Image (cartoon, rainbow, N blue to C red):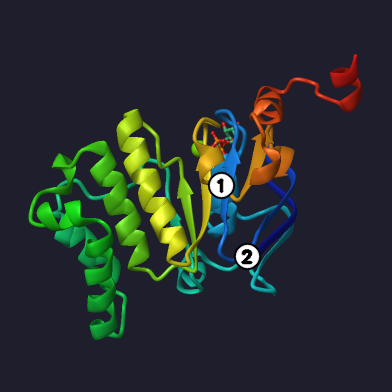
């Protein structure tokens, strides 16, 4: 579905992505994990058209999409839930959701999608008339994801959904991601921690210093040691293991 090859991106002279290859098959949940500053957000922003790649290619369903403006990419079904969620705290839950729907032409269809999003996140129905700023962190994350759903994503990208959440709340958010994936949505999720990716991911990439340090399918993760080694940048060649 999404095929990224040799992607480079820079902020002025600072290279943030240095030749990244990533493949997201339709129906999968792909995780990109890596320490702070690895280039994870830059990767998602490049896909979403917010950052212009300096080099490389991004193909979505066989079509080259580099250089398309963000609004166009959003309409094409590439939807990003940014780091920090970016919901409007002084607006109600309802207003946050309806803002996302305002560009939809088919109002009946949009209303159906809204009902579906509220079914998926029942807590939002309970808090519907309340200011979004009063929601807990986990509820705000659910609002951000529900809002993204109203844009009809074919590929939903989420930047650090667990950021600032308590472990139990992370479980809840991850359960929602699992449910969305089970209903057919393809997900590309970025996280700083490797801790929870194993039971959810179909594929994991470790990003370090703007490069892919490890690329493995979920069933290859095993006890997660290779994942952690790549994350922290330890040398783990077969020779080193044997020595
Ligand atoms: N707007 C920006 N201007 C300049 N440098 C940036 C900007 N955003 C990110 N960077 C730098 O690019 C690198 C990658 O950042 P980022 O993609 O945010 O990493 P991550 O999301 O993995 O923490 C870091 O060195 C960061 O300081
Ligand atoms: Mg980031």
Q: Quadrant of the C terminus?
A: top right
Q: Quadrant of ligand 1?
A: top right
Q: Could you tell me which secondary element the residue under label 1 belongs to?
A: loop
In the rendered image, residue 112, in percent from the top left (x then y), is placed at: 25, 77
In the rendered image, residue 189, in percent from the top left (x then y), is placed at: 51, 48
Q: Which residue: 72% across, 23% down? A: 233
**Mark 2 residue CB less than 8 A from any atom of ligand 1:** no
**Mark 1 residue CB less than 8 A from any atom of ligand 1:** no
In the rendered image, residue 72, in percent from the top left (x then y), is placed at: 50, 72
Identify the mark at residue 67; answer none if there is no mark: 2
Image quadrant assignment for residue 236: top right
Q: Which residue is mark 1?
A: 201
- Give the residue at the far top of this rendering: 243
- Give the residue at the far left of this rendering: 129
Q: How many other residues sit within 10 Å of disc 2, few (<14), some (14-19) or many (≥20)?
A: some
Q: Which residue: 70% across, 24% down? A: 229
Q: CA distance from mark 1 to mark 2?
A: 29 Å
Q: Is residue 182 left or right of residue 67?
A: left
Q: Could you tell me which secondary element the residue under label 2 belongs to?
A: loop
Q: Which one is in front in this view, the residue at disc 1 or the one at disc 2?
A: 1
């Amino acid at each position: 579905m999404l095929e990224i090859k040799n992607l480079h991106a820079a902020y002025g002279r600072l290279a943030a992505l240095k030749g990244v290859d990533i493949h997201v098959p339709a129906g999968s949940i792909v995780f990109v994990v890596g320490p702070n500053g690895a280039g994870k957000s830059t990767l998602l922003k490049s896909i979403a058209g917010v950052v212009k790649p300096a080099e490389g290619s991004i193909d979505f369903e066989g079509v080259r999409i580099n250089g398309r403006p963000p609004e166009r990419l959003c309409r094409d079904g590439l939807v990003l839930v940014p780091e920090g969620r970016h919901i409007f705290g002084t607006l109600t839950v309802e207003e946050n959701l309806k803002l996302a729907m305002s560009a939809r032409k088919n109002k009946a269809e949009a209303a159906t999608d809204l009902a579906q999003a509220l079914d998926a996140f029942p807590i939002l129905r309970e808090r519907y008339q309340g200011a979004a700023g009063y929601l807990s962190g986990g509820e705000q994350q659910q609002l951000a994801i529900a809002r993204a759903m109203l844009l009809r994503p074919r590929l939903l990208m989420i930047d650090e959904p667990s950021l600032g959440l308590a472990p139990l709340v992370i479980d809840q958010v991850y359960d929602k991601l699992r449910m969305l994936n089970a209903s057919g949505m393809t997900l590309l999720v970025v996280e700083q921690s490797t801790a929870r990716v194993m039971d959810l991911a179909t594929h994991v990439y470790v990003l370090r210093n703007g490069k892919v340090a490890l690329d493995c399918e979920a069933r290859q993760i095993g006890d997660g040691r290779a994942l952690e080694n790549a994350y922290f940048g330890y040398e783990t060649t077969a020779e080193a293991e044997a020595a």
